[in-house]
Image (tube, rainbow, N blue to C red):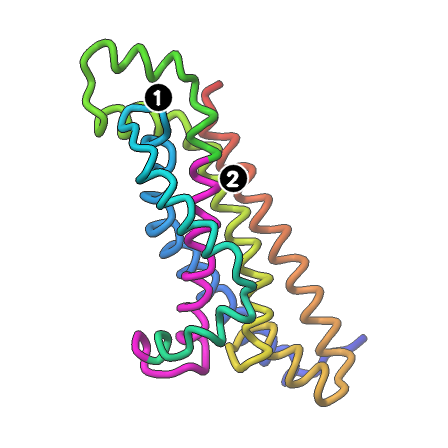
Amino acid sequence: MILSPVVLRLTWEALQETLVMVGLATLLAELGGLPLGILLVVTEPGRILASPRLNQAVGALVNVGRSIPFIILMVAIIPFTRWVVGTSIGTAAAMVPLTVAAIPYVARLVESSLKEVDPGVVEAVVAMGASPWQVIRKVYLPEAVPSLILGATITAITLVGYSAMAGAVGGGGLGDLAIRYGYQRFRTDVMLVTVLVLVVLVQGIQLLGNRWARRLDRR
């Protein structure tokens, strides 16, 4: 298969849009999901800031966010997307629903990562007089770094798939290229190249995440 310069240019531009969408949405989702995940762990009964009611409220909020399929969420929050970025079409607009959809997902991944921390270490630090904030900052987060990185890797890969769905409604990126040129114009070469680039992209993200986590794993 010989690709024309036009196809290569379109693919390169779409790849850049996807990288921007996924990269920024992953970063924003981590910033929003990390505090929620920490809150879910520390407010559990028997934890350093035990508050069952708050834990149930945050848990319910996260579950509601995770219950809505991305394609429905993307359409439902169009007014919010317009309010944030001034438009509902394009790469910038796609980042809003991507971030909103990923925050509860990240919160559960963070919760799972922090629960892997040895409770004995936490109890020892608390016994030495550490404040809850010190426990979070000096025990939970440092001990869970490799797992948090793997969680962020999973989030980024999930958002690659979501970004392809966003392309179906004008979100830009590789999904948009595949729909507009590959499907609607019957360009099999464009479709194949798009799929190939997505596979390579996901493999690359997973490889980088695994290596980074392995390097920081002190166990």
Which quarter of the picture shows residue 87? bottom left
Front-most of residues 47 and 97 = 47
Question: Which residue is depicted at the point 59% across and 51% down?
Answer: 204
Q: Position of residue 11 (x, y in %)?
A: 61, 75
Q: For the residues carrying marks 1 and 2, which lies nearer the camera in this image?
A: 1
Farthest front residue? 53
Residue at x-position 81% and y-position 75%: 1
Q: Quadrant of residue 49?
A: top left
- Residue marked by disc 2: 150
Residue 208 is inside the magenta segment:
no
Look at the picture and state if 130 lies above or below 107: above
How far from the left and from the top, in percent, is residue 196?
A: 71, 64
Viewer-closest of 151 and 74: 74
Per the image, label 2 sits on a secondary structure element best described as helix
Mark 1, residue position: 46
Q: Is residue 30 left or right of residue 202?
A: left
Decide which of 2, 79 is in the foreground and name it. 79
Tell me where residue 81 appears, x and y as whole percent: 37, 75
The amino acid type found where label 1 is placed reads: Gly
The total number of labels drawn is: 2
Residue 135 lies, in percent from the top left, at 27, 24
Instruction: Answer left or right for 116 relative to 125.
Output: right
Residue located 52% across and 46% down the image: 153
**Residues under numbered marks 1 and 2 in contact, where contact means CB atoms less than 8 Å apart:** no
Local packing at callout 1 (Cα closer than 10 Å; few below 14, some 14-19, many 20+) is few
The answer to which of marks 1 and 2 sits earlier in the sequence is: 1
Alpha-carbon span between mark 1 and mark 2: 27 Å
Q: Compared to 26, does 3 lie above or below?
A: below
* First to last magenta residue range: 83-111
Q: Is residue 109 magenta?
A: yes
Amino acid type of the residue tagged 2 in the rendering: Leu
Q: Tell me which residue sits at (40%, 74%) in the image.
A: 92
